[in-house]
Image (tube, grey):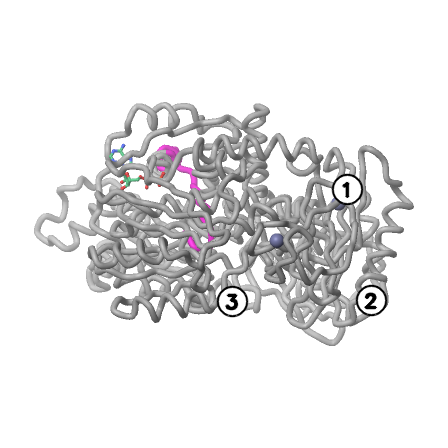
């Protein structure tokens, strides 16, 4: 049994009282006793070699029908091995909350109405004298069995259903659930594909496993390609899975898909659903009933018995990587899922991750491109605004403030992007631009306020924090990339005549809330949108003509080697927000270092050239994607304990594989976000030429760490870590 506890093993039980092993099927859920508790576990296998006298019986069988079929169990076990995760926890992560709590799947079972042999023999013109019955007959003839819920939604009454049953033309039976309905827009016909889109679509075979990276700017028609690929797969009687970033699953997106496929069963798996609805959607996907499954990260773990294509939209998005618990990457698992199902995988982005781009450039993935915008919107103009030595008002130059005012008074909308999180702070001088770098590496030092140190995250060089600039003696030093709440306040006050819409994680816990918040912006009134990453994508705001990026520097000089990549993606995506309608857009990027070569490259040649340069830099530095990387993390209220644990962890791994040119260790070092919820965070980094070299080390480490005695310490293995 896979039991949801943090141990990397399975547990044996006897069948529940009154049941024989032959009554059970792998994939079923059972209640099992575990250390004085009762937990929901999944039956993985039936074995006969366990010493019977030591076993406890399971308490109760939950489902008649197994929830996880063989291929989905194999997939989850593969993922547990790869990410060094407790197998019980990965099953728990795969299940929606209501099912995780043990609610029986039968609760959502549906009554299905289908034609009898006699009914199937009738022509569509039969029952002409009973028009309602005739309409129902025609529906069943054309579309096959229909659930009660579907019939009700289409206006067929219980009386009509009963009439067909009484004539012996139709009969009811119990079957799988259907997903809750999606409010759809008017059904909208597909536009004719342009030649580029046509070529892309033709390059994706549906009869075998391939991975394609679709690189195409915002508005180039990628979503249209996804829809056409789905259409082909559905026509072959298979399911399509579309994974979207957390922020991407908007009612707008759902309506667009529902409008294209009005006759299809569509299951949306997202956090906006009530627990019951989510279980219902999940069960319809797992039973093979849903034709299209759209979901965020965890949807990749859903069993899909008829899977025919996997599409990952905005594949570079950070939300595909789970950052706690089972630390899987939904994007990477999507590829494994496609391979197992013999189905094509399509990864789409305007700003591909370096991982996917590397795979495309080395020929492991097929590289597909859309170079033109599909609609008539023009690409925006981008300008750098130098900030060094400027009289800044809460982080903005007078020029930028003037542009914001002008745009609003023209009746247009402004989006101000304030970068508040995610970057490791480098220390810089506000007057001359001096930056604290490492004397041994080409990287910048990272500021750790608590220990008043500057540290290098590449070679572990350390020095004390300085109070004044070694170059110009200014005492005005600050951390890069640190936009503040105060900037937001200032803008709110200065442009008080206009609505100021503030979007960040705190103001918008749910998609619906975000949608409501943005409603005035969609109305087209002049307004000022203030936000973090949340605003960078997904929303069609045609009246935004000015985008301001308060600070591009944090991402250019961070010790996090992924920060420049993220900055480039962000700038490109944010810029993509400008000028999507008929009005031309303008983007202003504030920076202390307007001459920075990466910034120049990004603005002059675009993300494609920028990303290729970053890939070359990473090769020189021997960093992912050229190398495999895993972090062993530990956090604790007492920092010393976390460090001690990691010292010992590193020794464990080194005993198995000493450092070599193929395998290197770093740390323990403080995490870039050093302290979170009162706990101090550290990591040891292991990089290797091949992933296969890391697996045995990490497996051994987990074995050792599960026996480590310190209850206040939390540890984790983070394979392919995305954050340092
Ligand atoms: P992306 O997903 O790359 O941002 P979309 O597929 O959303 O691009 O397309 C952008 C806009 O262009 C949408 O309004 C879409 O309806 C429209 N569009 C896409 N393909 C075509 C086409 N072949 N002909 C006309 N309009 C198109
Ligand atoms: Zn200085
Ligand atoms: Zn260094």
What element does badge 2 sit on?
A: helix
Residue 207 or residue 184, whichever sits in front = 184
- The secondary element bearing badge 1 is classed as loop
Cβ–Cβ under 8 Å for marks 2 and 3: no
**Front in this rendered view, residue 444 or 67:** 444
The earlier-in-sequence mark between 2 and 1 is 1
Q: Is the C-beta of the residue carrying label 1 under 8 Å from the nearest atom of ligand 3?
A: yes
Where is residue 321? Give x, y as percent. 58, 50
Q: Which residue is drawn at 75% across and 65% down?
A: 451
Identity of the residue furthest to the bottom in this view: 36
Label 1, on which residue? 440
Q: How crowded is mark 1: few (under 14 residues within 10 Å), some or many (20 or more)?
A: few
User: Between disc 3 and disc 1, whose residue precedes?
Assistant: 3
Query: Which one is earlier in the sequence, the residue at label 2 or at label 3?
Result: 3
For label 3, the SS is helix
Label 2 crowd (10 A; few <14 / some 14-19 / many >=20) = some
User: Looking at the image, which is closer to me, 652 or 63?
Assistant: 652
User: In the image, 631: left or right of 106?
Assistant: right
Q: Distance between the residues labelled 3 and 1?
A: 53 Å
What residue would you read off at disc 3? Answer: 98
Q: Which residue is drawn at 60% across and 45% down?
A: 562
> Magenta stretch?
229-248
Q: Mark 2 points at which residue?
A: 641
Give percent across and percent down for residue 407: 26, 54
Q: Nearer the viewer, mark 2 or mark 1?
A: 1
Q: In which quarter of the image is the N terminus?
A: bottom right
Q: Quarter for ligand 1? A: top left
């Amino acid at each position: 049994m896979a039991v949801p506890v943090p141990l990397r093993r399975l547990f044996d039980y006897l069948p529940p009282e009154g049941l024989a092993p032959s009554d059970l099927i792998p994939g079923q859920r059972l209640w099992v006793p575990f250390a004085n508790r009762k937990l929901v576990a999944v039956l993985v296998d039936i074995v006969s070699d366990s010493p019977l006298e030591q076993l406890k019986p399971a308490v109760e069988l939950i489902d008649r029908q197994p929830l996880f079929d063989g291929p989905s169990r194999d997939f989850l076990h593969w993922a547990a091995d790869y990410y060094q995760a407790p197998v019980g926890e990965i099953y728990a992560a795969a299940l929606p909350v209501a099912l995780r709590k043990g609610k029986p799947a039968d609760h959502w079972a549906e009554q299905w109405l289908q034609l009898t042999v006699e009914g199937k023999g009738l022509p569509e013109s039969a029952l002409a004298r009973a028009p309602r019955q005739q309409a129902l007959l025609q529906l069943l003839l054309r579309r096959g069995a229909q659930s009660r819920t579907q019939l009700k939604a289409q206006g067929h009454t219980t009386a009509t259903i009963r009439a067909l049953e009484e004539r012996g033309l139709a009969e009811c039976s119990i079957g799988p659930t259907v997903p809750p309905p999606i409010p759809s827009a008017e059904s909208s016909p597909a536009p004719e594909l342009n030649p580029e889109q046509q070529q892309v679509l033709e390059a994706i075979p549906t009869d075998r496993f391939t991975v394609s990276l679709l690189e195409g700017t915002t508005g180039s028609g990628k979503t249209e390609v996804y829809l056409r690929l789905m259409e082909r797969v559905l026509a072959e009687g298979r399911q399509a899975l579309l994974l979207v970033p957390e922020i991407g699953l908007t009612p707008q997106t759902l309506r667009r898909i529902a409008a294209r496929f009005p006759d299809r069963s569509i299951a949306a798996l997202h956090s906006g659903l009530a627990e019951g609805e989510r279980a219902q959607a999940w069960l319809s996907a797992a039973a093979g009933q849903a034709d299209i499954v759209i979901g965020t990260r965890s949807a990749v773990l859903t069993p899909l018995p008829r899977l025919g294509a996997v599409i990952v939209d905005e594949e570079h998005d950070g939300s595909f990587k789970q950052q706690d618990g089972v630390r899987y990457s939904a994007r990477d698992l999507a590829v494994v899922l496609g391979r197992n199902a013999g189905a094509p995988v399509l990864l789409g982005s305007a700003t591909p991750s370096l991982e996917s781009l590397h795979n495309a450039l080395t020929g492991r993935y097929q590289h597909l491109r859309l170079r033109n915008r599909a609609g008539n919107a023009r690409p925006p103009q981008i300008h750098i605004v130098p900030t060094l030595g400027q009289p800044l008002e809460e982080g903005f130059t007078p020029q930028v403030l003037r542009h914001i005012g002008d745009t609003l008074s023209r009746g247009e909308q402004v989006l101000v992007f304030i970068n508040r999180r995610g970057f490791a702070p480098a220390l810089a001088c506000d007057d001359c631009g001096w930056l604290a770098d490492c004397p041994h590496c080409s990287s910048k030092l990272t500021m750790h306020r608590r220990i008043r140190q500057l540290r290098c995250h590449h070679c572990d060089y350390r020095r004390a924090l300085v109070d004044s600039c070694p170059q110009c003696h200014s005492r005005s030093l600050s951390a890069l990339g640190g936009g503040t709440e105060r900037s937001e306040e200032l803008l709110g006050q200065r442009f008080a005549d206009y609505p100021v819409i503030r979007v960040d994680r705190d103001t918008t816990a749910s998609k619906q809330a975000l949608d409501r918040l943005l409603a005035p912006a969609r109305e087209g009134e002049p307004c000022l949108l203030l936000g973090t990453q949340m605003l960078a994508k997904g929303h069609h705001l045609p009246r935004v003509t000015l985008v301001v990026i308060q600070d591009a520097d944090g991402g250019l000089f961070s010790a996090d080697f992924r920060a420049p990549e993220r900055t480039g993606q962000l700038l490109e995506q944010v810029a993509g927000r400008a000028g999507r309608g008929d009005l031309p857009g303008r983007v202003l990027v504030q920076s202390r270092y307007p001459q920075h070569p990466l910034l120049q490259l990004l603005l002059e040649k675009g993300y494609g050239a920028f990303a290729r340069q970053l890939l070359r830099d990473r090769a020189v530095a021997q960093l992912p994607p050229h190398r495999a990387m895993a972090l062993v993390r530990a956090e604790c209220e007492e920092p010393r304990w976390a460090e001690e644990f990691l010292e010992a962890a590193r020794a464990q791994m080194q005993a198995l594989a000493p450092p070599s040119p193929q395998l290197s260790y770093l740390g323990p070092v403080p995490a870039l976000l050093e302290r979170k919820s009162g706990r101090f965070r550290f990591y040891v980094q292991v990089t290797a030429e091949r992933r296969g070299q890391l697996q045995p080390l990490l497996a051994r480490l987990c074995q050792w760490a599960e026996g480590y005695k310190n209850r206040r310490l939390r540890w984790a293995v983070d394979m392919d870590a995305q954050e340092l």
